[in-house]
Image: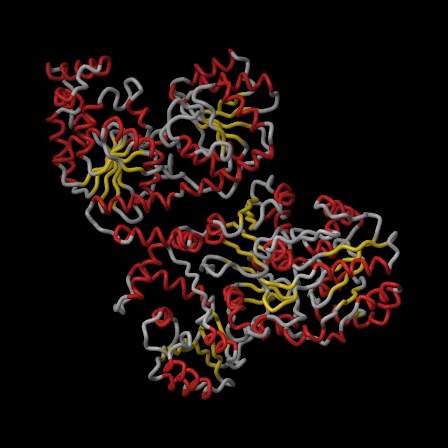
């Protein structure tokens, strides 16, 4: 569309100019945009608000439209305006023609109509007082017309000699002639309807930028960014700050901006003897540094529309204190993202300043809330709403308008995945950003934490922003408090919209398990999966019945650019075989050891004391003068999400060990598996007896190992890490026979590098003479360490980050060396169709697995027959189970449902990008030679197969030909 935005000025200070430029910069990406202004051309300064070079600027010489000679008619119009401004003389319906002609003469209107129609615009948008003029022109214009208000109702109609002062009757006649009149809040919409009976539409202003850097909540500086005019309440600010300074002698106030009252306000500060506490900055091109150096934003305005400075403050994490006027309570959540003292009550304003200034924890909480709130004002959301408005006024019935009810229902039903889809589709990936997640946000732990600590200390990574995913902010409070003081460290809560955005737009993604099922790695992102242990017990597809349960994990691994391996054993056992990555994985396996184990090589006396204090701060009853025996069992059960958790057995072990050792020398602590902690919390269970001996899930296990003197474990891979300490390991395995039967293990229990006990009595006997019990295992201990921990030396973080972040040019990665097998992707539906199922079974009987690598897109969870079929397939078949957590936007999701229910075979344009994304989500970076679709019915994956990058796709009628393909 060809769009004109008509305003008085654009290259000047002010919120309206910034908002117009911001919106125009986005609109010009898909429309022809012109900004029409009354300014002289020599004032053009596109750098002021970073105006796009693609935007046209039409500099209007108003003298060409207006006769300024002092004719009797000119003098009459001047008199009418003056009398009306002072007395409201002509603010009556019967005088509308007279007042309209005085404001915008008919001959001038005729010239404007001619000029604007010659430009052939589709839509003309005006700001502020020009909206009334556009309403006068609207009936004669070819273009559709939109007025756009940039202040509150009171700011436009109740302030003497400003905008629409004493022009209510004109507004009632001419604003309805516009196709739309836009206001900033529901309050304005209410007031226009209530007082003038004018219908309006709400469009909130977006934030002007996004910053990965956030303010320092510890800072003792207030900030104002404003114009020095009466409306902004700087005189009220000086009064409040004077009272504040009487009760505080530390905090400073920075004021950015300029204006007519500059000298007056500076003089007022001196008169109040607070000029040494107020920094009058003036105009600056670097406002960011002032936001970052402050911790509270102040806005004492007498009236505001939808102030952009609040969105800016929120984006930097500054809570805001503002008088409760206009639409402030629609932007600021009182006592959550700031305070809203009663309008113009300077004492209340001072009280709010004192409360927030003297409570650092409250500032931190409000800062987090402000950052989350900022997402409501994203420019992408605003542009989408404006484009929908354009389509409506142009009479274009959009997909959204036709299906609004279904789309809103989809948003409500799938809030996270649709938000994620929106962020992936609309938002760019941000350079120099890193997201860390461990065990689904359980805390700052494991290898992601080790990498984070390493990068945070390195000078060359100081410009990077670190984003931590946390599932329970209260559980991780101590860690958050430690790191949130860093301006480049942020925290997002797991499975929230903020988390979805971070996952979608962060450049580097680091996880030790897997991201949610709706996750897909964008081409611009770099995904490092560190995994979380060297396998002893069966994992991946080696677990019985795992073809469905391991689907998301396998998908994550196939999406990763880098997989961390402890060494050749893990690469072969875990990645190539158990997860069947051989031939299919396109990334790089880094046999560099686990980053988390670097901590085990820092075990000095100082680090031990520090770790003991940390455990104590987490509520663990640990004695710094006693040696630590740590019991760290793995999880048991058939389902990872529903582990068996018998705390009574744990208590019995604690008591038995205590009875067998000198309690003046030893103490027993417990570190349960992460999934057991999660399960106990979900079941509202927690250790009661001996609770203080249980180390919280939010504490890093390897930090605990660094101060552990004896480890008691079982099938848990934690003992492999512990071998790096050279200290004793005791194995307590009471269920060896049953565990091996239902789960399976890779190594014989006879080869464990330490004494093994099957009963509590045997555990007691071992600890009665521990040195004698472990002595026969010294050689096996060293052999096991060399086999399973060959790369652990305290420098894994350095080696891995050098590769991932491109510092190491000569990369020493291990590739998942491929064979010459033909890679075939197969889809056979949910095994509910008799014909396609028979054809697939015939394929399995005839295919030569020695020369073909077969991957099946699994489907049909919830149907017993389908699950049984999937879990009894030949082991040579790799199953990528397809969970339909589509990363689609709400509109794409509804469009997809409609398409699948229709008879059409042509994919709608709206779905093409979504279908490409869905293929990347399902297949990761995998590549195939051929595909076979064993159904002719219109189903989702068969439709997707049209996007596959393969040599050929075979169908239900000619699948036999794929068997004839030579290697």
Q: Quadrant of residue 235?
A: top left
- Counting from the top left corner in percent of width and height, residue 817 is at 56, 75
Q: Is residue 33 left or right of residue 757?
A: left
* Spot occupied by residue 940 in the image (x, y as percentages of width and height): 36, 68
Q: Is residue 60 left or right of residue 877?
A: left
Which one is in front, 515 or 60? Answer: 515
Residue under the image location 56 percent in, 50 percent down: 471
Asked whether 446 or 844 is in front, the reply is 844
Q: Residue furthest top?
A: 271
- Residue 375 in sight from this viewpoint: yes
User: Is residue 933 shown above or below 152?
Assistant: below
Q: Is residue 484 left or right of residue 321?
A: right
Going by the image, does 80 lie left or right of 663? left
Residue 155 in percent (x, y) is at 32, 24
Q: Position of residue 581 (x, y in %)?
A: 54, 72
Res. 56 image quadrant: top left
Tally the marks.
0
Q: Nearer the viewer, residue 446 or 629?
A: 629
Camera sees residue 798: no
- Give the image quarter of residue 742: bottom right
Above or below for 434 versus 286? below
| 403 versus 360 height, above or below | below
Instruction: Work out whether residue 21 or residue 812 is closer to the camera in this orientation and state it.
Output: 21
Q: Residue at x 69, y 56 (%)?
A: 701
Residue drawn 38% across the image and 81% down it = 834
């Amino acid at each position: 569309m060809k769009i004109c935005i008509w305003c008085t000025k654009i290259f000047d200070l002010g919120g309206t100019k910034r908002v117009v430029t911001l919106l125009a910069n986005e609109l010009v990406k898909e429309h022809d945009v012109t900004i029409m202004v009354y300014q002289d051309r020599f004032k053009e300064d596109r750098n002021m608000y970073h105006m796009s070079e693609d935007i046209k600027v039409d500099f209007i010489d108003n003298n060409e439209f207006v006769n300024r000679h002092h004719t009797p008619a000119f003098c009459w119009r001047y008199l009418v305006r003056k009398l009306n401004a002072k007395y409201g003389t002509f603010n009556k319906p019967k005088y509308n023609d007279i007042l309209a002609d005085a404001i915008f003469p008919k001959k001038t209107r005729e010239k404007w109509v001619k000029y604007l129609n010659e430009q052939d615009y589709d839509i003309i948008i005006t700001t502020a007082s020009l909206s009334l003029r556009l309403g006068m022109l609207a009936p004669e214009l070819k273009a559709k017309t939109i007025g756009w208000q940039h202040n509150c109702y009171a700011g436009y109609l109740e302030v003497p000699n400003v905008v629409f002062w004493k022009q209510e009757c004109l507004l009632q006649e001419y604003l309805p002639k516009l196709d739309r009149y836009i206001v900033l809040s529901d309050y304005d919409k209410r007031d226009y309807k209530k007082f003038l009976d004018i219908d309006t539409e709400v469009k909130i202003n977006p934030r002007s930028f996004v910053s990965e850097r956030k303010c320092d909540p510890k800072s003792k500086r207030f900030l104002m960014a404003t114009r020095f005019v009466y409306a902004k309440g700087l005189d009220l600010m000086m009064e409040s700050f004077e009272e504040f300074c009487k009760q505080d002698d530390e905090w400073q106030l920075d004021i950015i901006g300029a204006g007519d009252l500059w000298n007056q306000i500076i003089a007022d500060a001196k008169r109040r003897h607070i000029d040494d506490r107020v920094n009058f900055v003036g105009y600056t091109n670097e406002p960011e540094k002032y936001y970052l150096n402050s911790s509270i934003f102040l806005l004492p305005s007498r009236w505001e529309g939808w102030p952009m400075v609040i969105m800016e403050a929120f984006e930097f994490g500054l809570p805001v204190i503002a008088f409760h006027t206009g639409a402030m309570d629609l932007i600021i959540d009182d006592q959550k993202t700031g305070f809203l003292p009663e309008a113009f009550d300077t004492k209340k304003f001072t009280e709010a300043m004192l409360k927030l200034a003297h409570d650092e924890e409250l500032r931190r909480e409000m800062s987090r809330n402000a950052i989350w709130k900022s997402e409501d004002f994203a420019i992408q959301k605003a542009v989408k709403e404006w484009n929908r408005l354009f389509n409506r006024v142009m009479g274009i019935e959009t997909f959204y308008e036709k299906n609004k009810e279904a789309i809103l229902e989809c948003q409500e039903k799938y809030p996270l995945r649709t938000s994620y889809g929106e962020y992936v589709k609309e938002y760019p990936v941000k350079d120099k950003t890193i997201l860390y997640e461990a065990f689904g946000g359980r805390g700052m732990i494991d290898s992601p934490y080790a990498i984070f600590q390493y990068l945070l200390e390195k000078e060359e990574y100081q410009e990077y922003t670190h984003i931590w995913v946390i599932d329970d902010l209260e559980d991780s409070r101590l860690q958050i408090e430690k790191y949130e003081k860093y301006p480049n460290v942020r925290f997002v809560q797991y499975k929230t919209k903020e988390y979805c955005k971070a996952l979608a737009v962060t450049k580097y993604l680091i996880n030790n398990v897997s991201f949610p099922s709706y996750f897909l790695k964008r081409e611009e992102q770099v995904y490092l999966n560190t995994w979380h242990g060297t396998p002893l017990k069966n994992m991946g597809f080696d677990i019985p019945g795992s073809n469905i349960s391991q689907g998301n994990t396998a998908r994550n691994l196939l999406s990763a650019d880098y997989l961390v391996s402890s060494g050749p054993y893990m690469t072969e056992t875990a990645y190539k075989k158990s997860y069947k990555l051989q031939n299919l994985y396109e990334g790089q396996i880094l046999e560099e050891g686990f980053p988390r184990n670097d901590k085990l090589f820092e075990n000095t006396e100082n680090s031990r004391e520090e770790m003991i204090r940390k455990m104590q701060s987490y509520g663990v009853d640990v004695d710094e003068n006693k040696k630590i025996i740590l019991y760290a069992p793995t999880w048991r059960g058939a389902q990872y999400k529903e582990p068996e958790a018998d705390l009574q057995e744990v208590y019995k072990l604690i008591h038995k060990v205590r009875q067998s050792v000198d309690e003046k020398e030893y103490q027993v602590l417990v570190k349960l598996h992460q999934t057991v902690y999660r399960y106990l919390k979900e079941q509202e269970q927690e250790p009661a007896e001996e609770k203080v001996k249980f180390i919280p899930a939010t504490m890093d296990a390897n930090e605990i190992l660094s101060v552990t003197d004896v480890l008691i474990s079982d099938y848990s891979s934690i003992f492999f890490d512990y071998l790096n300490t050279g200290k004793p390991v005791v194995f307590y395995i009471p269920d060896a026979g049953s565990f091996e039967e239902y789960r399976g293990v890779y190594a014989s229990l006879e080869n464990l590098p330490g004494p093994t006990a099957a009963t509590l009595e045997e555990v007691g006997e071992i600890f009665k003479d521990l040195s004698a019990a472990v002595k026969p295992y010294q050689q096996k201990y060293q052999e096991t360490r060399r086999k399973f921990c060959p790369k652990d030396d305290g420098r894994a973080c350095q080696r891995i980050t050098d590769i991932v972040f491109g510092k190491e040019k000569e990369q020493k990665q291990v590739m998942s060396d491929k064979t010459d097998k033909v890679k075939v992707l197969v889809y056979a539906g949910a095994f509910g169709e008799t014909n396609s199922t028979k054809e697939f079974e015939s394929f399995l009987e005839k295919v030569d697995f020695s020369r073909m690598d077969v991957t099946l897109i699994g489907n049909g969870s919830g149907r017993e027959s389908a699950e049984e079929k999937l879990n009894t397939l030949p082991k040579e078949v790799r199953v990528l189970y397809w969970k339909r957590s589509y990363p689609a936007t709400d509109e794409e999701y509804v469009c997809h449902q409609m398409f699948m229910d229709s008879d059409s075979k042509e994919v709608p344009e709206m779905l093409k990008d979504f279908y490409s994304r869905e293929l990347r989500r399902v297949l990761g970076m995998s590549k195939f030679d051929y595909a076979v679709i064993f159904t002719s019915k219109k189903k989702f994956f068969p439709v997707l197969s049209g996007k596959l990058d393969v040599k050929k796709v075979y169908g239900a009628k000619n699948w036999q030909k794929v068997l004839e393909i030579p290697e």
